[in-house]
Each structure stands twice: as structure tokens, then as C-alpha cells.
């Protein structure tokens, strides 16, 4: 009976545990680096240095801030619903971290005499798994904003819900084009299908649509209406402080990493190198991380460039431009491939 | 008969052009142009001045903290205690108490000297009228502007402090800079 999806599961159980801890540790070590990188790069884009006072070149800034947040008092508004208010950030960060398990960092390698896949898990429903958890992660925003019992949080959460639902459709449709071309739903399978050409070339339209929708899905500028600090104070996490706020912050950046990882995997050939270069297996994770880094830089560049959209512009862009484009892209791909 | 505004009325287009090509350009072309603009800021470099470490040079006419002067040859004070500076001061922050010079105890070049000369820098507005009022160029405005302190009484500068060679904490703008 196969109601559950196939998981290509060939490693011993202890390798699974080591792998998951390793991926988690590496990404959570990278998170503060991304935060300081974003702030310093954003400074450069605006003709200033960014933080440069704490430690050498200001590199200890995230540490100082985390210590500051961790020592803050955990309070909640009297109008909030206590248990939902506490659970919501946990949902946000859990779903964000789960996405990491899907990003393939490398091909199957022979380490310690066993075959080890350099990824968390390789499920036969890769993109669906990602979208499922993206769908749950929206509960983190929604419940957090609603349970806060404040108008700003509530408005931010409502906007977030509408935005995530509208853009998830286009994001999914853009990805279906790739899935049709690759004839597989496994993310490692999609990478292996890109040995001749990366899908950014045949699926350029899909790539652009997916990227724009990803900006909206991760609540990054120019689609950061969820937090819109000018009009909504802080959006859905207005009432959050201390560690709960850090959880939301880390969830946002982890989502950025996951989305970069998915774009890298699906459109940029994952661990594959261009021009027929075949480096040894241990280079694979570095290649993936480098490609993800390019996307993170682009995320920051866009943030420095584009102003926030108005809410009606966001909606009309999502439904009237992006969704028809994604559908058209899917139809054309289906006709050409089929 | 309809009103003709004439040729010199310019029609202002308030909405962007609605055709598809213009729309596509607005979405992609203008975004790329924006990306180029922000990228050029990175290439240009940083325009921040890291204040406590690096300072903007001041102009020679900059009015900073006051200085009292002595004659370089005889070492006598230029101030003769005439209190014209105190009279000119709009903020009333200068206090001068004059005393007579005696032949065995000469302090200034004139008949009298300033026994007490105090400037309350927490009240001073750095207008430079004292410098203008002084008949002997005994008081001038220096270039130092870093005068913060912990108590108000620390900001009352005495004659000794004003006569002392000030710490050169402020770079002076060179010719043509």
C-alpha cells in the first residue's frame, strides 16, 4: 500500500541524525553571517558603512543583538491569547527549518564505506513537500498576528495571509513547468536532469516568475507589506519582543535561505558546475552554498532598490500579471514537452 | 465657441502609458535601471565621515572655543581688563575683574590687567562679538568645538585655561580644500 510518498532512504539511521544535525548547525551558523552581511551590504547600497563598531569590522553585531534580545523580558499584551501567542513563533521557525531538509547540497557520496546523500531527505514529492510547509508556515504569521490582540498585528497578519495565498499559486505553477521538463518530482532527480542544460535557459520565464513570487513568499521587499513598518509599525510581530521576535526573524531568514536553495536546485543546476567541469564530490556543498549566496545578495540588492508596493498593486500584480504568465508558461512548456 | 487655451499650455500626462510594451518596460526596464542606480552607489563608495576618528576640517574663520593671547616677545598678556568684550557679549557669559599693574608685578602691557577672566561656555553662543570688540586682539575665537563636559561648572573656563595652548583637536582646512 503506497499512500505515503516514497522516501529514497538507504542510509543507516545514525547517518540520518548526523546529517540533520550538521545541516541545522551549518545553516544556523550562517544565519548571523547573513544578517550582518545584509546590513553591511545595504549600507553600501546607501553610501554608508553599516554596523562597524562591535568587534572587527562590526562582525560581532549579530551576537550583541542576540544577547540583547535574549536578556529581554518576555511579556505579552493583556488582549492576547497566551498559548497561541507562544506557539506561533515556534510554528514559524519549525516550518522554516523543515524546508532545509529538502535542499540537496550534493550528490550521493561514498563516505565511511557507506553511501551518503548530501541532503536531508530525498522525497519523491520534493516541491510539494516545500509548498506544504510553506502553507503551514503561514499559520505562524497568521496566528501570531491574530493572537497578539492588536490592530496592527491583525492587519499585518491578514495582509500576509492574502499575499501568501495569491503568490503561492504562481510560484507553484512556475515550478510545474520545471517538473514537466524534468519528468520527476524528486529534487535530486531535477538536478540530475539538468546535466546538459540548466533549467534557467529553457525555463527563463518560469525562473523570473518563481523568483518574483519567492520575494512575496518570504515577505521580502518590495513585497514586505506584511511588516510594512511605515504604516503597520511592525506588522504581525509588532507585539513580539525578545526571543520570540528573534524566532520570527530567524524564520524569515531561514525562509530566504530555503528559497535560495530551491531556486538553485530547480533552475541553476544545484551542485552542477557549468562548462563541463566535474569537481570531486566534496566540492558540491560549496557550489550549492555559493549559488545560494548569489541569490541572497540579489535579495538584498532588490531590497535596497525597489520601494514597497501598494496593497492593491500587490494584488493586481499577483493575480492579473503573474498568474496568467505562470499559466501561459506552464501551457507552452506542456505543449513543447508533450 | 470652445475655449482655446493656446499653444503655450502644456498638457500634463498624469498616468503612465497603458500599452503592453510600456508596461513590460516599466516592470523590467525600470527595475533594471533602479538596480543599476543602487549598484553605482556601491561602486561610488561610502560618504560617511567616521566622526570621533576622522573629523571634517574647519575653515580658518570657524568660530570655536575662545583663546586669550600673550605677546610673544615679552610674554605679557594682551588683555588689559577693559571689559569691552563683556559689554559686547549678547549672552552675557564673560566676567572680567580688572586690577592695577604694579612695576614689580607686571602682568599685561597696559595700566591694568584682568585679575579674573571667565567665560561661561555653557552660555556662549559663539557669535564672535568679543573678538570684534577687543581693541588689542587679546581674545580670538579658536577652532575647537569639542567642549562637552559632565557638569555645568566645568564649562566655566578661567583665564589660565583660555591662555593655555589649546589641544589641536580639530583639523584646519587647507587652502583650496
Image (cartoon, rainbow, N blue to C red):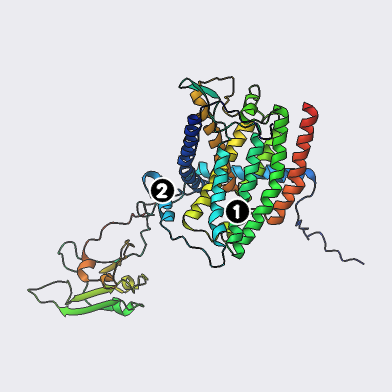
Q: Which residue is mark 2?
A: A63
Please rate how many residues cluster around mark 1, counting C-alpha atoms within 10 Å: few if below 14, some from 14 to 19, many from 20.
many
Q: Is residue A119 left or right of residue A206?
A: left
What label does residue A141 carry, if any? 1
Q: Measure how far apart labels 2 and 1 are at the Cα level.
A: 25 Å
User: Measured along the vertical axis of the image, is residue A278 above or below residue A185?
Assistant: above
Q: Name the element at disc 2.
A: helix
Q: Residue at x 69, y 33 (%)?
A: A204
Instruction: Give the camera-side residue of A92 and A285.
Output: A92
Q: Is residue A304 left or right of residue A68?
A: right
User: Measured along the vertical axis of the image, is residue A46 above or below residue A330?
Assistant: below
Q: Name the element at disc 1.
A: helix
The answer to whether one can see residue A132 in this image is yes
Where residue B108 appears, x then y in whole percent? Answer: 17, 72
Numbered label tally: 2
Q: Residue at x 57, y 43 (%)?
A: A256
Q: Is residue A162 left or right of residue B64?
A: right
User: Measured along the vertical axis of the image, is residue A15 above or below residue A246?
Assistant: above
User: Measured along the vertical axis of the image, is residue A15 above or below residue B120?
Assistant: above
Q: Residue furthest left?
A: B104
Where residue A124 appears, x then y in whole percent? Answer: 65, 31
Chain identifier of the residue bearing label 1 in the image: A
Please rate how many residues cluster around mark 2, counting C-alpha atoms within 10 Å: few if below 14, some from 14 to 19, many from 20.
some
The answer to whether one can see residue B33 in this image is no
Chain identifier of the residue bearing label 2 in the image: A
Quarter residue A265 falls in: top right
Amino acid at each position: 500500500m503506497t499512500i505515503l510518498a516514497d522516501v529514497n532512504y538507504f542510509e543507516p539511521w545514525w547517518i540520518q541524525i548526523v546529517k540533520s544535525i550538521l545541516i541545522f548547525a551549518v545553516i544556523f551558523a550562517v544565519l548571523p553571517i547573513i544578517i550582518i552581511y545584509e546590513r553591511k551590504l545595504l549600507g553600501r547600497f546607501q553610501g554608508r558603512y553599516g554596523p562597524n563598531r562591535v568587534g572587527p569590522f562590526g562582525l560581532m553585531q549579530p551576537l550583541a543583538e542576540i544577547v540583547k534580545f535574549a536578556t529581554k523580558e518576555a511579556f505579552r499584551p493583556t488582549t492576547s491569547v497566551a498559548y497561541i501567542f507562544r506557539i506561533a513563533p515556534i510554528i514559524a521557525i519549525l516550518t522554516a527549518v523543515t524546508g532545509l531538509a529538502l535542499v540537496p547540497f550534493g550528490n550521493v557520496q561514498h563516505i565511511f564505506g557507506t553511501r551518503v546523500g548530501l541532503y536531508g531527505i530525498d522525497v519523491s514529492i520534493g516541491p510539494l513537500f516545500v509548498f506544504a510547509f510553506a502553507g503551514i508556515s503561514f499559520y505562524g504569521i497568521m496566528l501570531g498576528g491574530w493572537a497578539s490582540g492588536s490592530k496592527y498585528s491583525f492587519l499585518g497578519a491578514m495582509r500576509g495571509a492574502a499575499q501568501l495565498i495569491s503568490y503561492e499559486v504562481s510560484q507553484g505553477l512556475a515550478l510545474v513547468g520545471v517538473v514537466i521538463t524534468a519528468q520527476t518530482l524528486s529534487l535530486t532527480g531535477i538536478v540530475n536532469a539538468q546535466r546538459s542544460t540548466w533549467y534557467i535557459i529553457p525555463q527563463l520565464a518560469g525562473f523570473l516568475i518563481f523568483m518574483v513570487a519567492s520575494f512575496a513568499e518570504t515577505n521580502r521587499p518590495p513585497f514586505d507589506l506584511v511588516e510594512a513598518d511605515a504604516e503597520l509599525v511592525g506588522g504581525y510581530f509588532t507585539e513580539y519582543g525578545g526571543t520570540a521576535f528573534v524566532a520570527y526573524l530567524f524564520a524569515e531568514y531561514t525562509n530566504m535561505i530555503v528559497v535560495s536553495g530551491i531556486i538553485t536546485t530547480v533552475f541553476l543546476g544545484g551542485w552542477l558546475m557549468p562548462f563541463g567541469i566535474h569537481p570531486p564530490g566534496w566540492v558540491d556543498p560549496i557550489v550549492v552554498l555559493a549559488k545560494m549566496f548569489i541569490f541572497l545578495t540579489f535579495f538584498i540588492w532588490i531590497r535596497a532598490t525597489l520601494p514597497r508596493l501598494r496593497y492593491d498593486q500587490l494584488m493586481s500584480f499577483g493575480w492579473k500579471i503573474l498568474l496568467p504568465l505562470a499559466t501561459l508558461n506552464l501551457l507552452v512548456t506542456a505543449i513543447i514537452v508533450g | 465657441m470652445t475655449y482655446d487655451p493656446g499653444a503655450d499650455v502644456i498638457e500634463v500626462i498624469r498616468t503612465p502609458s497603458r500599452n503592453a510594451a510600456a508596461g513590460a518596460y516599466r516592470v523590467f526596464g525600470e527595475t533594471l535601471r533602479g538596480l543599476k542606480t543602487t549598484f553605482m552607489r556601491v561602486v561610488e563608495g561610502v560618504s560617511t565621515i567616521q566622526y570621533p576618528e576622522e573629523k571634517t576640517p574647519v575653515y580658518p574663520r570657524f568660530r570655536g572655543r575662545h583663546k586669550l593671547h600673550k605677546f610673544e616677545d615679552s610674554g605679557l598678556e594682551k588683555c588689559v581688563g577693559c571689559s569691552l568684550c563683556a559689554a559686547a557679549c549678547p549672552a552675557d557669559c564673560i566676567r572680567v575683574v580688572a586690577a592695577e599693574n604694579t612695576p614689580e608685578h607686571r602682568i599685561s602691557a597696559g595700566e591694568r590687567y584682568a585679575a579674573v577672566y571667565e567665560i561661561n561656555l555653557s552660555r556662549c553662543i559663539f557669535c564672535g562679538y568679543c573678538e570684534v570688540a577687543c581693541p588689542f586682539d587679546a581674545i580670538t575665537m579658536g577652532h575647537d568645538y569639542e567642549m562637552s563636559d559632565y557638569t555645568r561648572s566645568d564649562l566655566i573656563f578661567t583665564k589660565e585655561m583660555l591662555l593655555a595652548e589649546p589641544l589641536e583637536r580639530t583639523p584646519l582646512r587647507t587652502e583650496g580644500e
